[in-house]
Image (cartoon, coloured by chain):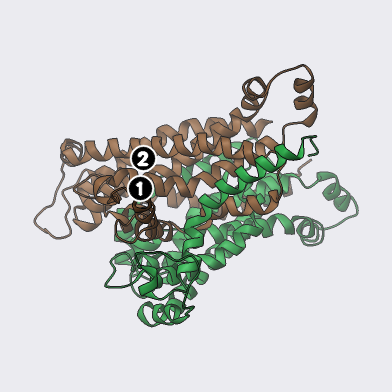
Amino acid sequence: MARNVSTGTKVGFTIAAWAVALILFSPILWVLLTAFKTEAEAISNTPTFFPQNFTLENFSAVQDRSDYFKHAINSILVSVGSTLLGLIIGIPAAWSMAFAPSKKTKDILMWMLSTKMMPAVGVLIPIYLIFRDLRLLDTVHGLTLIMTLINLPIIIWMLYTYFKEIPVDILEAARMDGAELWNEIVHVLVPMAVPGIASTLLLNVILAWNEAFWTITLTSGRAGTLTAFISSFSSPQGLFLAKLSAASLLAIAPILLMGWFSQKQLVRGLTFGAVK
Amino acid sequence: MATAQTRTLARIMMAPSVIVLLIWMIVPLAMTLWFSFQNYSLINPMMTGFAGWGNYLYVIGDPSFTQSLVNTLILVGGVLLITVIGGTFLALLLDQPIWGQGILRIIVISPFFVMPPVAALIWKNGFMHPGYGMLGHLWKFFGLEPVDWFNQYPLFSVIVIVAWQWLPFATLILLTALQSLSEEQREAAEMDGANAINRFYYIILPHMARSITIVILIQTIFLLGIFAEIRVTTGGGPGYASTNIAFLVFRTGILSNDIGAGSAGGVVAVVIANIVAFFLMRAVGKNLDA
């Protein structure tokens, strides 16, 4: 966008925008800096900006106290597992709705979206009881199942909007050439759909990673994900600010990096394709 | 151009998704409805049998319900107000010719990727704690008495945290909408002598209206279910001062083991969400035809 403005105006807008952005970013910056401070420095009455005595001991303390790696592995298993499961179920559904639509397709899509509207607390109690009876409470596979179900509508919607953009003519041409349906999918559709599938995967891993209702209510020690790991820091004992920061940094860093790469898809995914 | 064979295949491919979502939608919801009419407590085995409207009367009649409902409305309304107005201004600002726009976008969107319990604990301990929080230091710097946010203004504190998480979402979506506004349209208005305020009211705002609607509706769905932020900061307290409907159901059903009353609360939550969903579906559905 090349609007002609004077340099002065541009400087003014730049300063204003950066100031607002840095205020918004300050809690994350605080975590980043405090994680490397000693506890004494973190709660000192004269706050420092940069760590005066740079230390990594908070990270090892967090690992010793709450076993970060166990929780991180659970988070990875649940978020990646549920996303892959969702893609396996969702890709065929989205494909058929995008390329072989019927009169009911729109209704089915809207109905799928409506399942996402159901508030989690509305079904918390039965799910909790079912999980208790089936011994699924505090298990990684139980949580993965729930996560798949709550994110499946978003997965199907995102894939559907991406698949819709693939020109049908190309599929028709492949069909004319005598390609079998299966070949059509593998050799024509998949290569064109890969970017869309990748975006869907990325966004859903992020959503599942940050999900904090089911992960907290359905797990405790064994299958706890990073959201549960962090929640265990809510009742602090003694000096803990630097350790809390270290734990927070460990929990958000991976997904923050992923998020930065997927912000365009985020808009589309979270608005169910309504804003692109 | 779908052949009969394709159509059959399409149905088969759709079946797994439809079936699992159907089960997911119907079974737990039916159970919630069923429990909501039963006397059922996990700690008191003597409580059994049909309760009629008893659980509903018990839940809705309790002062905690009215307060939770009001808290829910304040929480949703407050966050929407901050994020939509703030997001509009921030989007307008980021759309100006500025240096480092790409990096700024990334910085501004970051809070959205911070998981709710982390966001809540950073704010609670690092910023809003009266003793060593950054806001406390800032207040002291200006010679003011540090505020004990979570005890004095528990609901407001939760609103601040949630608004911080959702402001980037609103900004990003509104910025995306803003950038799709054609340059010709803006220039034409500029040449016709429309000033910045008129351009905002007559060109930019109408163009953004649909995106603003979508932001409001989607956020409302998520905001009705705010849970982790309350769980790790105030625990719903003091008293019920920061308990919303979602947290009330958790308190009643899981913490107090009263399945019947908790379920009745859950049904109420579903009804509220459905009213909102009705409007969201219409907005998104309209777009589907386009």
Front residue of this view, candidates A88 and A44:
A44
The image shows residue B213, relative to residue A101, as above or below, that is above
Nearest the viewer among A12 and A60 is A12
Is B10 displayed left or right of A40 in the figure?
A: right
The picture places residue A21, in percent across and down from the top left corner, at 57, 49
**Is A186 left or right of A115, judged from the image as shown?**
right
- Looking at the rendered structure, the number of numbered marks drawn on it comes to 2
Quadrant location of the N terminus of chain A in the rendered image: top right
Label 2 resides on the chain identified as B
Q: Which mark is residue B40?
A: none
Decide: few, some or many residues near mark 1? Use Cα within 10 Å; few <14, some 14-19, many ≥20: many
Dot 1 corresponds to which residue? Answer: B158
Is A5 located above or below residue A79 in the figure?
above
CA–CA distance in space, label 2 to label 1: 8 Å
> x%, y% of residue B195?
69, 20
Q: Which residue is mark 2?
A: B75
Q: Colour of chain A?
A: green
Identify which amino acid the numbered label 1 is placed on.
Answer: Val
Provide residue B106's location: percent of width, then percent of height: 63, 54
Q: Amino acid at mark 2?
A: Leu
Q: Earlier in the sequence, mark 2 or mark 1?
A: 2
Q: Going 40% across and 71% down the picture, which residue do you hit? A: A242
At horizontal 49% and vertical 75% (from top left) the residue drawn is A73
The chain ID associated with circle 1 is B
Residue at 53% in and 37% down:
B215
**In the rendering, at what x and y percent does residue A195 appear?**
73, 57
Residue drawn 48% across and 41% down?
A: B219
Q: Which chain is brown?
A: B
